[in-house]
Image (cartoon, rainbow, N blue to C red):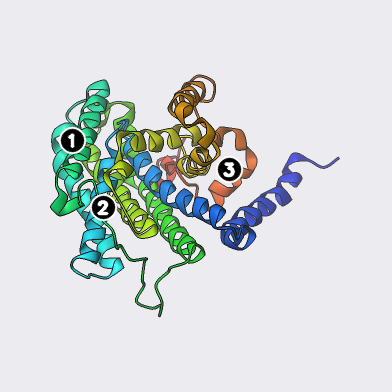
Amino acid sequence: MVSPNRQGRWVTPAFLVLAVGFAFLAPTLFESSFWLHLFDMMLVNALMALGLNVILKTGQISLAHAGFMAIGAYTSAQLTVKLGLPFLAGFLLGGLLAALAAFVVGRVILRLKGVYFLLFTFALSEFLFLLSKNTPALTGGNTGVVGIKPPALPFLAEPLRSKAAFYYLALVILTLAVAFVAALYRSPFGRAMNAVRESELLAGATGYDPMRVKVIAFSVGCLLAGLGGSLFAHFLLYIAQFSFTFWESVNFLLMNIVGGTASLAGPIIGAMIITPLPEFLRAYVVWQQVLYGLVLMLFMRFLPDGVVSLLGPPYRALAGWLGRLGRPAPVEEAVPGAGEGS
C-alpha cells in the first residue's frame, strides 16, 4: 500500500507542471478570439482583485476600487493619446496617480471603521463615477476616450496588437505583482497588517501605528488597481465611465470572497471563476446581479474560506513552491532565537 506521503511526491510536481504549463500554453490551446479575450480579462481582473486583497488584509472592505482603477485607466489613456507618451510611462504613472490619490483620501476616510468605512467608499465610488461623467476634458464624458494604442515595449519592434501577445504581457505583470505582494505579506509590514486586522488596539500596543499601516496598504492596493486600469484601457483600446461603476467594485470583492480572502491564490482563482460568468449568462442578464448576490451569500454562509479551501494538498504544494504565498513568516524566522528554549 502506498503511503499518502509517497503519493504526494508525484502529485505535487504533476500539479505544478500542469498549472504552470497551462498558464504558458493557454493561448495555443484556446486559439479562438472569444477564449483569448476571456483569458486576457481574467489576468487583468486578477491584478485588480489582488489589489483589493491587500486592502482586505487590514480588515477594510472598499467599494471604491473601480474608482481607482478608473484613475489609472484615464491617466494612462490620456497621457499616451494626447501627449504621446510611451505605454510604460502611462502604465506606471497611471498606477502611481491612483496610489497618490488613495494616500491622500485614505488619510481621511481610513479613520472610519466597519460599516461606516464601507458606506463612505460606496459614496466615494459614486463621486468618482460622476466626476468621470462630468469632466469631458479629462475623461471624454459620455463619449469616453478613443484611439488608445495597444501596449508597445521598447525592446519589441511591433506593438502587442494580438490578444495572445497581450496575454503574455498581462501574465508577466500579474506574476510580478503576485511576487511583490507575497514579499509584502511575508515582511514585518505584512505581520503588522495581520495585527491591525485582528485588533487595532493590540497592534498599537505592540508598537505598530495602525493608521499608517492601513494608509500604506490602501495605497498599495489602489496602486495595483491603477496598473490594472491602465492594462484594461490598452487592451480594449477604448474606455468610458460605464466600465468603472460601483458594480465593478462589487465584482472585485466577489472574486476575493469566492476564491478566498486569506490566500494570495484566492483573488486569482476568483477572477478565473467570476470573469467568464457574464459571457455565459448573457441570456439571463436581468438576473445577473441577483445571481451574484446569491453566490455571495452562499459562499459567506457555507464556504467562508473560498474555493481555495477545497483544493487541499495540491494547492498547499503550489503555495509552498511559490514561497509560501499569503502566509506570514514563522516567528522563528521573524525573530531570531524566538523559538529557542521552548
Q: Is residue 297 left or right of residue 85?
A: right
Q: Amino acid at mark 2?
A: Gly
Q: Is residue 95 left or right of residue 341?
A: left
Check disc 2 and report its element: helix, strand or loop.
helix
Residue 261 seen in the figure: no
Structural crowding at the residue carrying mark 1, measured as other residues with C-alpha within 10 Å and reported as few (<14), some (14–19) or many (≥20): some
Q: Which residue is mark 3?
A: 316
- Residue 279 placed where, x, y %? 51, 41
Check disc 1 and report its element: helix, strand or loop.
helix
Measured in 3D between alpha carbons, the distance from the residue under mark 2 to the one under mark 3, in whole angstroms, is 34 Å
User: Which disc number belongs to residue 72?
Assistant: 2
> Looking at the rendering, which quadrant does residue 233 occupy?
bottom left
- Residue 100 placed where, x, y %? 18, 50
- Tell me, yes or no, whether the two marked residues, 1 and 3, touch with CB atoms within 8 Å: no
Q: Nearer the observer, disc 2 or disc 1?
A: 1
Compared to 48, does 163 lie above or below?
Answer: below
Q: Which residue is mark 1?
A: 127
In front of the other: 253 or 207: 253
